[in-house]
Image (tube, rainbow, N blue to C red):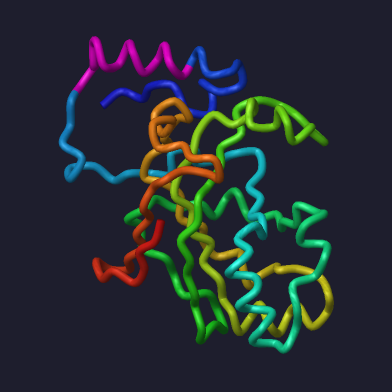
Amino acid sequence: MAAGPRLIDLLGDGGERLAAAGAKTLASPAEVVRVDRVRLLPPISRPPAVRDFMTFRQHIETIRKSQGLELPKQFFEIPVFYFTNPHALVGAHDPVPMPPGCQNLDFECEIGVVIGRDGANLDPKNAADHVVGFCLFNDWSARDVQRNEMEMRLGPAKGKDTATTLGPWLVTKDEVEPWRRPMGYDLEMVVSVNGREYGRDK
């Protein structure tokens, strides 16, 4: 199959190039291949940056409670994130190697928000205009390595450097609009490893 345009090259203009490419492909596909006959790479294989934000209040409260701590007021003031490795992205069905020195490899089930336009220090009222779509996101964590290295009050570093699973699909905002609710989207997420389901939530 001949290589087509990269998805990342279709972003940056408010969604027009992406919509046009999708319409053209549906109307006149160069080739049709069954999905089980191909290896699905991350939808965006080399983004300029990948940031993982701490936004799920219940999750953070549970972690803090297990440490005898309360949720800090900064949670409501600062969009805290860390930079992860854009060169370590893997597809939804790719194997994930055990990091060196790790005995406790952990996974999660998160939503990746794909930003399609440049911007910085955006006003929350129009920040969503920069979002082109969403995909499943799983930052694999070497928890024992992470705990040890963060005693230095910097990081995470090697504890989050091995792999981030992304995809398999990029779903555009208009495609999920029917499921929009006042506080997000009414969508179900499922996480599985080696075919075994470990979590399901809405």
Provide the residue span drawn in magenta. Answer: 18-31
Closest to the observer, 63 or 25 = 63
Image location (x, y in percent) of residue 32: 18, 25
Residue 34, above or below 32: below
Closest to the observer, 14 or 33 = 14
| Quadrant of the snapshot with the N terminus | top left
Image location (x, y in percent) of residue 149: 73, 79
The tally of labels here is 0
Closest to the observer, 163 or 53 = 53
**Who's the residue at 70% across and 54% down the image?**
83
Q: Residue furthest front?
A: 182
* Left or right of 166 on screen, residue 120: right
Residue 110, above or below 103: above
Query: Which secondary structure dominates the residues rendered in magenta?
Result: helix
Image location (x, y in percent) of residue 17: 49, 14
Closest to the observer, 180 or 52 = 180
**Who's the residue at 83% across and 75% down the image?**
153
**Who's the residue at 56% across and 23% down the image?**
11
Residue 119, above or below 43: above
Image location (x, y in percent) of residue 21: 40, 15
Residue 198 in which image quadrant: bottom left
Magenta stretch encompasses residue 22: yes
Residue 174 in which image quadrant: top left
* Left or right of 68 on screen, residue 11: left
| Quadrant of the snapshot with the C terminus | bottom left
Magenta stretch encompasses residue 80: no
**Who's the residue at 74% across and 36% down the image?**
124
